[in-house]
Image (cartoon, rainbow, N blue to C red):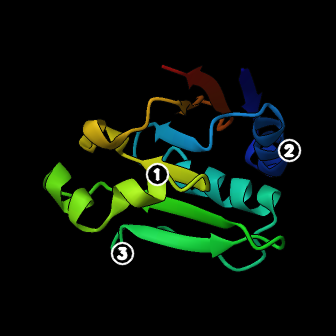
């Protein structure tokens, strides 16, 4: 799936991603400041999360609950120094829970990624619009 959107249309783009049935573990790629966290906020809203969402840069993971009582996990592993830190916090349990897992900077934890996952690559165009490419990976 590939789409371009303006920030004012980010919620429509997030809904399109959810409606495309990606895997529940989604890795986000893109330069710092491209809007990964902002897009994840819109994904959470599309899934029915009503509480305020924010970047888990310092906590590593934020857990949200949808209106239907399902959990959504948002990871930012940028500050991890090793994969063992992710194991120590039990990240593998989150990833295999069957719940939505959105992960920024997943290249720091390659051994923890399940066999079935999706990737969202985000880039910013000179006009300020964003280009999103969603790919699914299965074992």
First-in-chain label (3 vs 1): 3
Secondary element at tag 3: loop
First-in-chain label (1 vs 2): 2
Q: In which quarter of the image is the N terminus?
A: top right
Towards the viewer: 51 or 25:
25
Q: How far apart are marks 1 and 2 (CA)?
A: 26 Å
Depicted 11 relative to depicted 118: above or below: below
Looking at the rendered structure, the number of numbered marks drawn on it comes to 3
Q: Distance between the residues labelled 3 and 2?
A: 29 Å
First-in-chain label (3 vs 2): 2
Which residue is denoted by mark 2 in the rendering?
12
Q: Nearer the viewer, mark 3 or mark 1?
A: 1
Which residue is denoted by mark 1 in the rendering?
95
| Residue 25, position as x, y percentages in the image | 54, 43
Q: How far apart are marks 3 and 1 (CA)?
A: 17 Å
Secondary element at tag 1: helix
Query: What residue is drawn where x is 59% and y is 23%?
Result: 136
């Amino acid at each position: 799936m590939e789409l371009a959107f303006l920030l004012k249309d980010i919620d429509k783009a997030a809904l399109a991603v959810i409606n495309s049935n990606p895997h529940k573990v989604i890795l986000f790629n893109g330069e710092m400041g491209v809007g990964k966290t902002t897009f994840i906020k819109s994904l959470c809203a599309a899934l029915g999360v009503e509480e305020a969402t924010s970047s888990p840069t310092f906590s590593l993971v934020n857990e949200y609950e949808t209106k239907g009582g399902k959990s959504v996990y948002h990871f930012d592993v940028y500050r991890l120094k090793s994969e063992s830190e992710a194991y120590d916090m039990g990240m593998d349990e989150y990833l295999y829970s069957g719940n939505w897992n959105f992960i920024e900077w997943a290249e720091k934890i390659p051994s923890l990624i399940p066999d079935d996952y999706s990737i969202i690559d985000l880039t910013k165009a000179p006009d300020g619009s964003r280009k999103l490419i969603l790919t699914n990976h299965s074992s």
